Image (tube, helix red, strand yellow):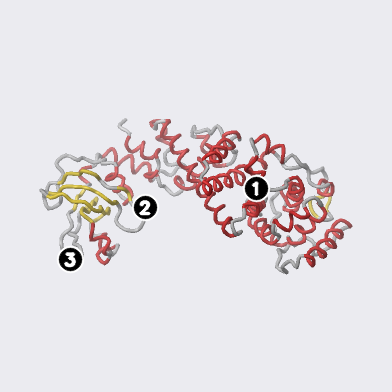
Amino acid sequence: MFINESFVSFLWQHSYYNTARLTTTAGEKIVIKHPGYLNMHAGPDFMEAKIRIGDIDWAGSIEIHVKASHWYAHDHSSNLDYNKVILHVVWENDLEVCRNDNTTIPTLELYERVDPNVLERFVNLIYQSAGYPCHPCLSIVKNTSVLSMIHKTMAERLDTKADDIQKTFLDTGKDWDETSYRILFRNFGFKVNQENMFLLSKLIPFRILSRHRKNRLQTEALLFGTAGFLDKVCDTYSQKLRDEYLFLRYKYSLSSSFLKRYQWRFLRLRPQNFPTIRIAQIAKLLGKMDRIFSTIIGSPSVKDIMHCFNIKQGVYWQHHYDFGKRSKQKLSGIGKDSIYNVVINTYVPVLIAYAKNIKDQGYLTKAREFLEAIPPENNHIIRKWAKIGIQPISSFESQGLIELSNSYCNKKKCLNCNIGTDILLNNH
């Protein structure tokens, strides 16, 4: 039976083994006063543990291995940090281990102290071939364990996004307007074109584009020209944009570095999602926003945001999906799902990042209220959760489930999950 180090660490952390009459492999009595705190950084696995071995009280680190010989396989003998290890906890003691001063490290062996039912649940969980390993056991999981894990992963997801915003904030010289502008552009790329949209926002700074936001022709000229769509003239409108772009490019001494048309992805996208349409939509949207950042932090509700985004791209782009290519049907404005996507991936992360910067709990509350006001996403991950009986009621929960799936389930990190822990600790 294959046992991994995470499982042994789990057993030690939760004292989920027979703790009666504990002894080292040398026969000395062990009393666990405190197992220590899990170390998420380099060094021994648990820090600040307190134990008694024989008649001596010890305080220090605990190292976890499947086999005692892994101490040498992991080259701990040459690392001075491991001289502070007071107990070596292993599944199997296959070798006596010494510190680099040749003193023997006391060892606790666990394999005969673990309930076979726990082992069986561990194997069934970790080696379950189903999409979600916990699926067959969900009936014995407490609802509070599921909800607490969703909230935990939601917080982790928001922190990750906020950290990403912070990097952009620093890259812009701590300019919240420029930061919000770049993040909004990136999310208007909707996955397939988001990196190109992000690059486009960096090539045309907000401070320049904002001067022309009331003139849609000039705004589109700057965007489509820099995006590489005006290299060839297809009709009268593209000629107007090209002429305007060449003038503005000279006026602002814009970089000769710009995107190329071939970099943009059109394949397998509906015309409504073509990058040309998205650029036209954001050009129109900018004309409605005085300051993107102030709009984000000042929006009182999702309903207010929906109203702000209730726009249609220019007339040309209501009838063309590309330059010189007419659409058989009139193209609508920004759809409801697209607006929800922007709230989730632009408004909320910016609010979180800003709240952390100024230490204002109010913006954290607003971000959560936005997520709770938006229906859950309907994607393949959420549909998989729904099939096994977990149905989110808002985007707050669906975002948590997406993070849970990507960061825990897909990586089989069940022992770090409240649901997996509940299954292993369940006595039914």
The kind of residue on which mark 1 rests is Phe
Residue for badge 3: 101
Q: Nearer the viewer, residue 90 or 124?
A: 90
Give, as a three-letter code, the residue at label 3.
Asp
In terms of sequence position, does the residue under pointer 2 or pointer 3 come before the other?
2
Front-most of residues 319 and 217: 217
Crowding at mark 3 (Cα within 10 Å: few <14, some 14-19, many 20+): few
- Which residue is the site of mark 2? 40
Q: Is residue 94 left or right of residue 367?
A: left
Q: Quadrant of the C terminus?
A: top left
Work out whether mark 1 precedes mark 2 in sequence or the reverse, and give the earlier one: 2
At a point 79% along the width and 54% down the height, the residue shown is 322
SS type, badge 3: loop
Q: Badge 2: few (under 14), some or many (20 or more) residues near its Cα, within 10 Å? A: few
Quick one: label 3 or label 1, which is nearer the N terminus? 3
- The disc at residue 293 is 1
Identify the residue shown where x is 75% and y is 57%. 223
The location of residue 382, given as percent across then percent down, is: 55, 39
